[in-house]
Image (cartoon, helix red, strand yellow):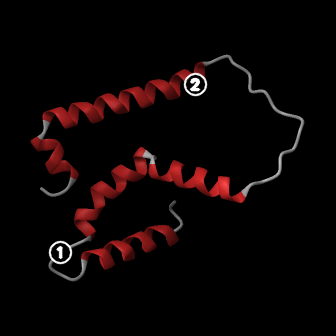
């Protein structure tokens, strides 16, 4: 076994922490869906600040647990240390993911 599955199998504490984090994430989502609070829309139009959009998107992508778990699960399968430079392989995998239309 390689990658995240080996790490989770070796550490029961880490497995339980990930399960607990997933339960909290699910609870927050259900709580948000079930809330009766109305969304307040503003009548004023604010100008678009592209720098802020970039940083918001970057932070959202980096902290997305689905994306992180996806890469932890597939990187050991797609990046092999004996076939060439690892940073180049990771770069190619990242480009493939980026331009595959799945993100």
Q: Provide residue 48's location: percent of width, then percent of height.
A: 78, 54
Q: Residues within 10 Å of mark 2 (few under 14, many from 20)?
A: few
Residue situated in front as seen by the camera: 100 or 3:
3
User: Splitting the image into 4 quarters, where does residue 54 fall?
Assistant: bottom right
Q: Provide residue 40's location: percent of width, then percent of height.
A: 78, 27
Q: Provide residue 98's location: percent of width, then percent of height.
A: 49, 68
How many numbered badges does the structure rendering display? 2
Q: Which mark, by number, is residue 32?
A: 2
* Secondary structure beneath label 2: helix
Residue under the point 82% across and 51% down: 47
Q: Quadrant of the N terminus?
A: bottom left
Asked whether, in this view, residue 75 is left or right of residue 52, the answer is left
Is residue 50 positioned above or below 35 on the image?
Answer: below
Q: Which of the two labelled residues, at mark 1 and mark 2, occupies the earlier sequence position?
A: 2
* Secondary structure beneath label 1: loop
Is residue 47 positioned above or below 33 on the image?
Answer: below
Residue under the point 25% across and 75% down: 86
Is residue 8 positioned above or below 38 on the image?
Answer: below
Residue situated in front as seen by the camera: 56 or 94:
56
Outermost residue on the right side: it is: 43
Camera-near label (1 vs 2) is 1
User: Splitting the image into 4 quarters, where does residue 15 fall?
Assistant: top left
Q: Provide residue 73's location: percent of width, then percent of height.
A: 28, 55
Task: Give how far apart the Cα atoms at labels 1 and 2 are.
Answer: 43 Å
Q: Which mark, by number, is residue 81?
A: 1
């Amino acid at each position: 076994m390689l990658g995240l599955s080996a790490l989770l199998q070796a550490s029961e504490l880490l497995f339980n922490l990930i399960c607990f984090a997933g339960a909290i994430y699910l609870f927050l989502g259900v709580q948000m869906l079930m809330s009766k609070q109305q969304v307040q829309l503003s009548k004023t139009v604010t100008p678009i600040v592209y720098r802020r959009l970039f940083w918001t998107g970057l932070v959202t992508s980096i902290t997305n647990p689905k994306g992180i778990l996806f890469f932890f699960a597939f990187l050991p399968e797609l990046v092999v240390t004996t076939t060439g430079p690892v940073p180049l392989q990771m770069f190619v995998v990242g480009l493939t993911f980026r331009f595959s239309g799945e993100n």
